[in-house]
Amino acid sequence: MATSNNEISEGLLNTDLWDRLDFHLGSYVKSPIQLRYVSSKTSTIGRALQLAIVDLIDHVKRKFADYAEDNSTLLGTENRLYHSRQYSLTAKDANIESFQSNGIDDKLNIEIGSLAPTIFYQLREDIGISNEKFRQSFSEHGLKDFTNTGKSGSLMYKTSDNLFILKTLREYEARLLIQILQGYSIQFRQRPTMFNRYTGLYSIRLESSLSNFTIYVVVMVNAFTPSLKINEIFDLKGSTINRKITGYLSTEKFYKLKDMDFKELYPAGIRIPTNIFRKLKTTLANDAKALRKLNVTDFSLIVGIRHLDMSKTQMVDRQQITGITALLRATNSLTSIHQKDLAVDASPSIVECEVNASLNSYLKPLEMLQEKLDMDLYYNNDSVAYETLPIPGIINNTNKRVYIYLALVDMLQTFDSFKLIDQAFRKITDPNRHLEYSVIEPNDYEQRFIQFLFTDVFYDANNDFPWAITDVSQSVANINNVKIKKKKRSEENHQTDSPKSAVHGTNSEEILEFHF
């Protein structure tokens, strides 16, 4: 059984040298080395982290219930407060069958600290996540570690109910979050924002036979839970260089798509209702401006799309390919032709469907935007949509319907000296395209980001937004055909029936088409 000391330490972090404009040399050099060491102990660390989150949140709850002012914190230093506890775990404690003991490191001593615990405790309540529900996500089952497909190579976990994702941060990213935390928490009370919800920050101090070091883990809301049945996930930055998947499109790649993939698959973009378009544009513009003033760059808007009218085969066939790539994809299609042609479910590596998957999602787009629409019309016969409030969209040129989920992520990367040197190199080696690379100066990044989203991705529907009212499974593209057939049938009935019955028949079968 995992052991811990029974005392929780409290104190204040030293932030005197935490300068977000420094070189971040330590983070760039140390992080890869540290992650290489802990990657073989992810299950052990995950188990200790799970225990600590529950223990430390209980500690905050007790302090609030029986508050007594002490010397651990002063007014205005709440973001520097930390609570910590030490744990000792072995491979047996974490149920790790493949753990390879070297006789020295089979026992791991870990000190886990909760950073700014009182601010995060209140923040969770402010964004609609009760601390009891938060605790429940970590107390009932173990954390699941999964592969990070990003270039950072950070460790990632998710809770068994898939509601929260845990990700390691570089030291300077953790420091920035602590610095802005009080202002960040106020944002959710003052205005609509698409910022992803950070719900906790933890430090993990490892004691090994070689050295002692600290890594940081942030807890954030999972934007795309399995119950959303998302078919595609796009990571959008407005960049055009190295922002496309390689090879032919396949179901395994639907959850790793980028900017140029979006332009290829949706060349005319997606239109959304006018009131939502205006609110979304204003909200994202405010978010991007806030990050620019913090000198942050390289953030992303992740967009999850659920198709209502498109099959798996139709989704794959959208990609225009020729030559050997087309031959390879045709061969791949033949091997799976016996499978039933259903709409694609979420990728197992990202959001696998599980028996205990919750229908809830804490990131509800319309709630984040503080905007409303006619739910009976847009979410007709879809309980998941009623629960999670996606943005309804219609694909231009095809009139296929989609539900859209989205959030702003990766908001802690400042334009430091290394990025400045990289940008200067791009200006020299590729002067005509240096602004198309992923990492550019914050001012340019903000402008490019917003322009791309509201020039190539989202369109104002104005008065052209037809939506089926009868059944969410019916294709918008077929509405006009159905109306023509029913109108023809009505006219035939009118010729043979009495005027009274003919009028009654027409009204009872008519399919309504709405424009907003």
Image (cartoon, rainbow, N blue to C red):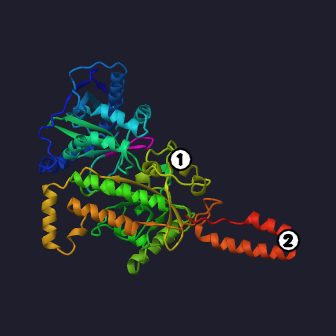
Looking at the image, is mark 2 or mark 1 nearer the viewer? 2
Amino acid type, label 1: Glu
Q: Which residues are magenta?
A: 156-165
Q: 10 Å neighbourhood of mark 2: few (<14), some, or many (≥20)?
A: few
Q: Position of residue 358 (x, y in %)?
A: 50, 43
Q: 10 Å neighbourhood of mark 1: few (<14), some, or many (≥20)?
A: some
Q: Is residue 91 visible?
A: no
Upstream in sequence: badge 2 or badge 1? 1
Q: Is residue 423 visible?
A: yes
Q: Secondary structure at mark 1?
A: helix
In screen coordinates, is 282 left or right of 15? Answer: right
- Residue under the point 80% across and 76% down: 492
- Residue placed most toward the observer, 402 or 224: 402
Q: Position of residue 429 (x, y in %)?
A: 14, 72
Residue lying farthest to the bottom in this orientation: 323
Q: Position of residue 253 (x, y in %)?
A: 40, 63
Inter-mark Cα distance, 2 to 1:
45 Å
- Residue placed most toward the observer, 351 or 492: 492
Q: Which numbered circle lies on residue 499? A: 2
- Residue under the point 77% across and 68% down: 506
Q: Which numbered circle lies on residue 387? A: 1
Q: Position of residue 447 (x, y in %)?
A: 28, 64
